Amino acid sequence: MVEKRVALLVMSISSLSIWELLTCTNIIGGKMQSMFVLLSLLLFVYYAYNLLRDNEFENSYFKFIFSIFIFYELIIVIRGWSFAFDDLKTNMQTGYILWPFIIPLFIFFDKNVITFGLFFKWIYYSGLFFLGLVLFFPSYLFDRLTAETIIALVIPSGFLLLNATYLSDRRVFISFLIVFISILSLTYLARRSSLVTLVGFVISSYFLHLANKSRSNFFRYFPLIIVIVTLILYSFDNVSERLTRKMTERIYEDTRTELYEMFFFDLKDDILLGKGMNGTYYYPFGEDSEADGIVFGAIEYRNIIENGYLQLFLTGGILHIILFSMILLPSAFKGIFDSSNQFSKACGILILLQLIDMFLYGLPKLSLHYILVWICVGVCYKSSIRRMTDNEIRRELTNIDKL
């Protein structure tokens, strides 16, 4: 029963990327996408509700701060709420409006180690689906819209690398292959923020396993693997030049200074409390086509800014950022430095990488990755899990079908 719930939770979230992919490749229309999205969201809410069953706080600081944070987020939602049908539809279907205020409830995710093992298992299956897609449709990796859509499926595969000590070498290798293919695609498309996220997972995984003397055979030979891959890529000048040309052109490109200036000017009177869930700022641009081939409609006021902390600032002001940081920073510290097992350390590293990523992009939104961040927050404040040994966790995971 638990596996069914975990499986359908992961599949319901992953399916949102599938519907988006089918829409941007003109296989289905917008109305059909809306219908499929609604179905996926209903399944997600139902199975999430059945898995959010750990209501016990083991840390008084966390209980106090999280209660204030949730209360303040409720105020933010109320300030931006509308009962108009179009607004309700937009709030439900747009991942960065309403859902970031609901996802923190995943701190209550079932903390049974077996449940986490099942979560690993279905994250891995999502990665296999990604491999199947790129095998049959490799062109998806060379288009910005399709690449970012399908890579969203596999960013949590980086979490599997952090937990490689509990997984078979085959699954670790395949997870690395998935992340590596994604890194190549993002390098070719010059998607800097997503690239930093995945590279951060790879580097953190290696040093975590080095520091903890992991039993993973893959990471023992990791430096050799990187050297071999690098030599292969750079032995073909045309391949390496085409792979990095766009990134070289964009590495120092400043695309946000003007945006940030207008953003802060518009919010100069809302610094403390922001503008609420549907807060907007003035930044007009006409309908135009980017070099990457994505067309944006004409707009004067935007409700999204490509920076995680500034998105918090837009909706809830500096108070929102402070409360958010007061929860995530201590949880990352506890997971990395005050735990007896690699799973808790991996959770702490995932949270830390999210905090770093939010300086570049790291938008709080409805995604498996952001859900995983808040699950990890719950784990890192759970001393009963942090005190477990790796062998104790490994024994629990042996109950899962050849994890």
Image: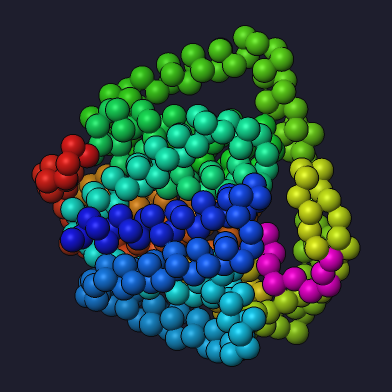
- Residue 202, relative to residue 303: is it above or below? above
Q: How many marks?
A: 0
Q: Is residue 317 visible?
A: no
Residue nearer the viewer, 359 or 398:
398
Where does the magenta region start and end?
A: 298-309
Please identify the quadrant where the N terminus is shown. bottom left
Identify which residue is drawn at 45% across, 54% down.
Answer: 14
Colour convention = rainbow
In the image, 382 versus 394, the foreground residue is: 394
- Report the quarter where the C terminus lies: top left
* 148 relative to 47, above or below: above
Residue closer to the observer: 307 or 8: 8
Q: Residue at x 75, y 27 (%)?
A: 245
Q: Is residue 329 left or right of residue 112?
A: right
Residue in the image at 64% along x and 59% along y:
29
Q: Is residue 49 magenta?
A: no
Residue 232 at x, y percent in the picture: 56, 12
Task: Give coordinates of residue 160: x percent, y percent.
Answer: 35, 42
Q: Taking the image as drawn, is residue 182 in sight?
A: yes
Residue nearer the viewer, 164 or 93: 93
The answer to whether residue 32 is left or right of residue 215 is right
The residue furthest right is 286
Quadrant of the rendered structure where residue 68 is?
bottom left
**At which x and y percent is residue 386?**
23, 56
The x and y percentages for residue 395 are: 11, 44
Say which residue appears at 30% left-offset and 36% top-offset: 164
Q: Tell me: 336 left or right of 361.
A: left
Query: Per the image, is 304 magenta?
Result: yes
